[in-house]
Amino acid sequence: MAITRPKGTNDLLPPGSPKLSPVTSAAAHIWLTETARRVLERAGAQRIDTPVFEEAELVKRGVGDSTDIVRKEMFTVYYFGDHGGFILRPEGTAAIVRAYLQNGLKQLPTPLKLWTSGPIFRAENVQKGRYRQFHQVDYEVLGSADPLVDAEAIALMVDVVRELGLKEVRVKLGSIGDPADREAYNAYLRELFTAHLDRLSDDSKDRLTRNPMRILDSKSEGDQDLIAELSVKPMLDFLGDEARAHFEAVQGYLKDWGVPYDLDPSIVRGLDYYRRTAWELHHEGVGAKSALGGGGRYDGLAEILGGQATPGIGWAFGVERLLLALEAEGVELPQTEGPLLYVVALDEANVPHAAKIAIDARAVARTEFAYRAMKPGSAFKDAERRGVRWIALLGSQEIENGTLSLKNLQSGEQRVIGVSELAAFLEAEKQTSNFSHNPQPTPHNPTPQESP
Ligand code: AMP
């Protein structure tokens, strides 16, 4: 039986593939990541990459023992003779904070804005928009607790989706206060839910002892019904003076800058090291419960990882979710462009000649050649399938004269030029057309397959 890819993973495919969709288009992933890079780097963010696998302990501490991620969804990595203590990363933040501490990055100008992108792994129940290997774009700012940093992070997240062309996004904003505020809230929740223990799901009974706030985040319908019935007070009612002032400052900046948001008291981040601002970005097209991305402040995280106290805040987008949202809004994804020049030999003996011309021309523009000789009719058909702009048919006559007979497949224009003029010709064509020498990847932007 043929071997297929593991459940919940995608192959990212080239243009024209029969099973292509926005989620499985390699070009769409590259374009999306490149767009995010542009927005984030123009705001001063620097690229960072961390390993795809890390010590399990990092994730246990960094994501939290009581989360579904740690309890049910971690992929463990084994290799011969190892202690089995590695996992595939289920998110990006903990590793970035680890890297910040381990590499002495606090010596760089503060606050330090970092960004990354790449594959993330969670052994979840697979459904539309929920995979076991997916991709995130991540932005983290370390070294400042200023509400200005929070507001800027939210504004940048909105900038990225706008630059992608998405319109129907909503920021849902909340605050989870300082640790003492959360303790008070947890005490309130514990009392409230203990009176209805029999109606809680098993997971939530467990949360009641470990971390009652996480009950509000439960995926169980029964839990959600109970929460609605009890008219549970929101965390926002429990904010202390400092957290409230911080939250108001964040909102003030967002209003000043015209970044729209809705207050959402249901936003919870139950872990000890999360502080204050927390938010999610939602889109109608991806379903009510599915966020495009989320973010929050995590001032306690560096210490939990054994480092010096370092305030931090960050967010992550799901790349596949963004692509689904773009599809739902009917936003046309950019097409991969075909070659500017296609060189085809008319006789087998001249194929190496065509190859040499094409390979030289690549110094200037994207150029391909045919590996077999073709008759003009099939050459034109083949060139059309490849999205070629200019085709050069190479016969013995042309080689003798040192010329090229060019035809523009879009306009029908024909030209004869000397081989020595080809570079200048392509250079001029590049200016007048929308073809470019290197339209897609950049060194900053590994394609998903070769991601960190
Ligand atoms: P989280 O780290 O859980 O806040 O996730 C951040 C974003 O990653 C979410 O808002 C989703 O867009 C995306 N995401 C999370 N889990 C998955 C998954 N299993 N499949 C696809 N995207 C996901």
Image (cartoon, rainbow, N blue to C red):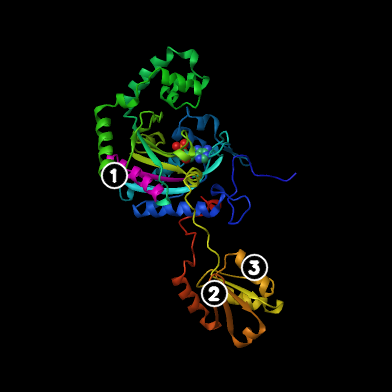
- Figure check: 42 above or below 432: above
Q: Nearer the viewer, residue 271 or 388?
A: 388
SS assignment at label 1: loop
- Figure check: 368 above or below 168: below
Q: Earlier in the sequence, mark 3 or mark 1?
A: 1
Q: Amino acid at mark 3?
A: Lys
Q: Which of the 4 image quarters holds residue 252? A: top left
Identify the disc placed on residue 258: 1
Q: Is residue 47 visible?
A: no
Q: Earlier in the sequence, mark 2 or mark 1?
A: 1
Q: Residue furthest front?
A: 412
Where does label 3 land, which residue? 381
SS assignment at label 2: helix
Identify the disc placed on residue 361: 2
Marks counted in the figure total: 3
Left or right placement of residue 121 versus residue 316 in this view: right
